[in-house]
Amino acid sequence: MATSFIGCTNSSLTEVLSSIEKSEGLPAYLEIVQAPQQSQSTFTSLSPSLKVRVLDNTGETVSNPADISIELIGSNGTLHNITPTVTDGMIEWNQLEVTTPGTAAKIKVKVGLLESETPTFDLTTKAVNFQRPTYVSPIDGDQSQWAVTNTLSATTSANFKTTFYKKADTNNNGIIDAGDSNRWVGLPAGSRLTLANGTYDNVGKLYIGGVGEPNKPVIIEAATPGGVVFTGSTEIYIWGSYVIFSGIRFQNVKPTVTSGVMGSSLLFLGRTGTSSIITPTELNIPTSYSLKCNSCALRYNKVDNSNLAFDPGATPLEEFDTLGTAGVGNEISHNTFIGRNNPGHFIVIWRTDGVEDKARIYNNEFLDQVYASGANGNEVLRIGTGADTYSSSKSIFENNLVENADGEIETISVKSWDNTIRFNTFRNNKGSICVRSAGRTLIEANYILGMNKSGSGGIRAIHEGNLIIGNHIQDTNPGSPADMSKNSALVLPMGTNNPEANYYFPVKDTKIAMNTFVNNKLTWNIGADAAASVTNDTIAPTNVTLAFNFILGRNGEPYADLYSPLANLNLKDNYAANGLFDSTRTSQPDFTSQELPSFAIVTNTWNSIERPEDPMRNHVRITTAKLIQANLDSTEIARITSINASIYDIFQPHIRGTVGCGF
């Protein structure tokens, strides 16, 4: 059995001890491996956690220490729920419940007769607490070279900044030593930040970012989904690459600045370094670094501003967006966005010239937007601005539920090229899907259910090369006759060359095929002047194909108003029943190439979908042969994902709870 000499300085005592065989495995030393630096008051989530271990006289860890206790020193607080976890001899406390906490404290740990104290730490910091990240691949292999700065006033709305540094060999002596300065790098690949559960009010601006990799993302998450709640004046800025932000709840939140700043948002996935919203100088980082997000993801979060106060008569108005994203390849999925009263948008994709965004927005809920201000905007999604016409975004908005989301005219506003809107359910909204100043947009297999709400519309397509394929549009109601040219089930307005901001590009080379239109106030409005005051809009839609569509009209209501010359339209195998064809003409054009067959309509009870059965269901089924007959070229056909199916074969309309965050 080995002999150990611990802390002996007296030679005579050493001689005595040298003759004694000591027993192994008995507790001899209590080591605090990790001490907390801060905590959140009342329900105290320690950051980092408190870890201790007991060593025997040989320096080995005691695997099952007994008689463990802790007490609070330097505070009037009382500890509860203090049972730790013990894993392979490591004793750990992640959270302690404290009643009546003081300003600062130590924790004394006792194991049998052994005891040790932590350094003093702040027990009342109102901060976003997080566990130290797990470094999968520490840079230079040395975690000790990393430092973390995090500051947030307990009583004010000062900014909370989480910035990671690494020592750089700035004195060029070939080693990392105390004389070297910090170099900003951001969270490394494989890091995981866990935000402690709790409610954080008026946080101000919170900046979090990192440089992840495809197989080693940076993960920022709540301790439990929905357990972290931000309220009041709060903005979250996420930047970097391969960063995942998940499980956070925002309740009645607005940005620190809500007027006078374009693009103010609650959440930002990236922002350019030249933005007036955020600059590298704010974070004390190199000005050359891009603060955009690339390949970042916002997943399973909830923003609920249902009860956020809004004064529509305020000057200036409080205007802000819920989420803005800038960068390439970002994902926004499985989130719930509910309740908007103020001007602004749920989501804006901010474009950069010459760069394709390739954003993907899917499996989200957008619910209960009130259009109270009368201002321009209030869209669920805007892709780009008017300045982005002719730039390609290639973003996708799919498999989302948009319900009770009222806006000015546009529910979705597409202002860039090559985007896709597919497999969504739009229900009971005031507004339309609008391809405002863009081309080559694909709108495929969406349910658009107006529920006869005044101001509800279907699809308004402007510019060139757009594809409207396989959608079901039902019960839309533009409201006043003046709005027929904006929010009918299908609108192709007049245009003008080189339009100014309020004018429209000419509609041309547009294909509209295999769509079902049921019980709409006005189904097709083609060639009307969208704004009577805009006299420059004089170019009628040209080279428009309408093929294999089915219209079930309202009794006594017109199917279509066709102001465009019929020579500009390629009408092929469309069927219409139960209404008038064209209220603008005394004679009806050849709308169908054959006699209308008999068919049945099946009504879905929950959402009142009036779905045609065969042969009409087969008539709107998408096939390659029909797409070719509808004049789609091979590149356009390759974009269609529902070949050999109709919308009724692909999915039933979404209902609340089938998409979104789940909490």
Image: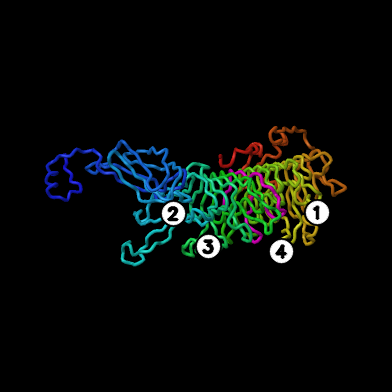
- Magenta range is 359-387
Residue named by callout 3: 279
Give, as a three-letter code, the residue at label 4: Asn
Which numbered marker is on residue 498? 4
Q: Split into 4 quadrants, where in the image is the C terminus?
A: top right
Identify the residue under disc 1. Answer: 565
Sooner in the amino-acid sequence: mark 3 or mark 1: 3
N-terminal of the two: label 2 or label 4? Answer: 2
Q: On the picture, is 427 further left or further right than 219?
A: right
Image-based side of 389 in relation to 121, left or right:
right
- Of callouts 4 and 3, which one flags the residue occurring earlier in the amino acid sequence? 3
Q: Nearer the viewer, residue 48 or 302?
A: 48
Q: Which residue corresponds to mark 2?
A: 187
Amino acid carrying label 1: it is: Pro
Q: Is residue 244 left or right of residue 339?
A: left
Total numbered labels placed on residues in the image: 4
Q: Badge 1: how crowded within 10 Å, few (<14), some, or many (20+)?
A: few
